[in-house]
Image: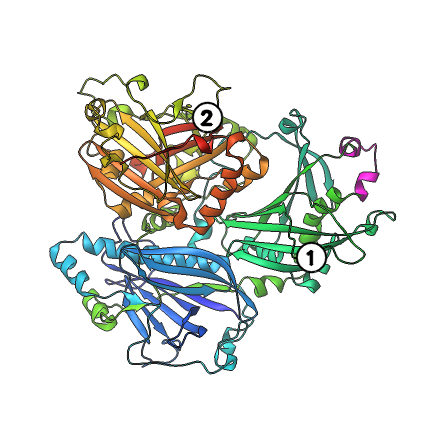
Amino acid sequence: MASQIFTKVKSEGGSSESGGSESGADERGGNNNDTFEYFGWVYHLGVNSIGHEYCHLRFLYIRGKYMEMYKRDPHENPGTKPIRRGVINHTLMVEEIGRRRVNRGDLYVLRFYNRLDESKRGEIACASPGEVRKWMEAFDRAKQQADYDLSRGQSARDKLKLESEINLAGHRPRVRRYAHGLKQLIRIGQGPEKLLRQASNLGSNSESDVYFEADGADVIEAHEWKCVRTLDGVRIFEDMANKKTGKGVLVKAVGVVEASADTVFDVLLSLDRRRRYEWDTLTGDVELLESLDGHCDVVYGTLDLRKLSWWQSKRDFVFSRRWFHGQDGTYTILHFPTEYKKRPPKSGYRRIKMIACSWEISNISTSSSLSPARCLVTLILEIRSKGWFKWKNNEFSKFERTLPFGMLSQVAGLKEYIGANPALTFESSTVVVHSKTSGVSMSSNELEDAIGSDEFYDATDGDSSSSDEEDDEASNKQDKKVKLKNVSWAIASLALKKTSAPDISKELNPDVPPLTLDPSQFHGTMRHGKGEGDSDCWSSPSGSGFMIRGKTYLKDSTKVTGGDPLLKLVAVDWFKVDECITNVALHPKCLVQSEAGKKIPFILIINLEVPAKPNYSLVLYYAADRPVNKNSLLGKFIDGTDSFRDSRFKLIPSIIEGYWMVKRAVGTKACLLGKAVTCNYLRQDNFLEIDVDIGSSSVARGVIGLVLGYVTSLVVDLAILIEAKEEDELPEYILGTVRLNRVKVDSAVPLEG
């Protein structure tokens, strides 16, 4: 079943804009002359009044900050009344749950809940993760509109209080329907006939495909990849830096696939026997043993190694898969060998431990939205075979009959399989995005009267960040010359030599003499490191290891290396708590409440709430030696709205030392934390505290769980910054950094009352 999504922006003063642009909104919720619309088919998941689970195909319609749910498309069936409707409140939280098996089909689920009242919740589902991402952007846009209305004055604020949220979980008003069997449930793959087998136009008018980022990651990579061989159009690389450690050889296979990242991700995750037989020469039958959550499962499979060597016996294996969908659209799939006692070895097979590997799939931007979708597929694994070195030098052929070689060849098989099946894109990428023009205008009052104020929690409720700022940035770039991704190495190397340091006089008051900040005057529970080899401690590196937006970023997407941070890290607390804690700055024993802390002009407190058993809190204290200018970007962030902060608070992670699979899980791309997890803000006196609830996202919980398992061997760098979106805000600068050196979990101390 193909789901159909439409996007348009209607201007009250004229016709709507076309071409996939959703511009016309400012950072505080959009130009009030524009009405943002987003609509399409989704699956509504829930439990009815007698406890039966249901999955209904519904038409969802977002107009401004309002939402409606229909049984039929209202455009094709005039007079159709919505079965649910209401306002998308600015306190709505939207979480991507991941994949779930529903009625013998796989769906990708979005969960909604009110951060002030978690009893209000609901779920919808889409056929592909790419479709989920677009709906999340639409919800962010609607929440930005609600935030804008709140900022317009007391009358608008009072009116919003009278409007009820949409209720997705509750029963429909005056309507109670009971499912009497599976035949009355919407089956996956069925729906309105006109929606079946539509040619995918994904990305032709989608704004996400014109939101350009700089090449590569947001950190300076420690790997030194060297191409050693090509195999059926796929390049084979060896990590020269990793080879020096003597712990094995890190290798990767890289290929360009003529399909979207959504399509390739769907093929890789599929366990369909007939499909895998067409591209995977290594593994035989595979089956799902257990789904741990929407982003992790356990899979059983067989290997017939006689295809590689006649003397090899049949083998079987069990591995766990964990996958993530980054904010830049990149998919990461991690394969870990695991034990599963419920599934003993198959008769005639020997159980082996599969090689850990990671798949990364990222879209390749093109200069034209009409160009066919392409993506870069990378498979990384660690090889301990001595035959590798002889094989790459053409001295050894037996390596071609080994398990690692068979795994590397999967990229070539995947590339050829998708290339030979053009219809595959239509099957796995079910989103059809259109941008319609319309001369119809509707005033804000008419829209509000049409929607009404009924509850609608089957669709939204939220508080995460708005994407209006990103919409503006994407649309602005449409009018400017597009930078192609394959820029020459000379230009790229020139960009690396540029450094972006903060303009202190612009961000901090130059008329006030700076205060001397000596970390020895401030005491946290984690020790300040004395050298590179020190363990269980923190330090503050420069920003030279991070790539941030340069002065010309809006024109050519150029990124430059960061300079020294604006704020100084003066202390770090590492707490162990039963329940995640917030408002750490108000604790009487907190650094902020000390005599030395009260003398600091401004302190930024980052409280990273780490979910575990028990829970932990990593609290970072960044100090400014002078007062902050109110009109600076930092000043606007400190005293801005929560929605503005969510849309700008950015973190860049970098694993300097550690297990390579953890590096792939954490990634090297910047993350807008307000979009990924729940962030709460406390602004008082001379400080701003940001409480980052990592446990609010199932994806983040999975990554943190992996990191904690290797934390004593990791050296982790983090950079904190405020994302620049306007010309006068560029270039970006790094707000603060921290390096965590091989932290011991047991060294965390209880936070006493």
Question: Could you tell me residue 463's position as x and y percent?
Answer: 30, 53
Q: In the displayed structure, would residue 149 be above or below residue 577?
A: below
Badge 2 density bin: few <14, some 14–19, many ≥20, Cα 10 Å: some
Give the alpha-carbon distance from disc 1 to disc 2, as whole Å.
Answer: 48 Å
Magenta segment boundaries in residue numbering: 387-401
| Residue found 20% across the figure and 30% down from its top | 629
Q: Position of residue 390 (x, y in %)?
A: 80, 31
Q: Name the residue under label 1.
A: 417
Magenta residue check for 172: no
Q: Does the magenta run of residues contain 393?
A: yes
- Amino acid under disc 2: Asp
Q: In which quarter of the image is residue 119?
A: bottom left
The answer to whether 729 is drawn above or below residue 410 in the figure is above
Amino acid type assigned to the residue bearing label 1 in the image: Tyr
Of residues 673 and 445, which is closer to you in this image?
Answer: 673
Q: Main secondary structure of the magenta part?
A: helix
Q: Mark 2 = which residue?
A: 536
Residue 507, picture quadrant = top left
Mark closest to the chain's N terminus, 1 or 2: 1
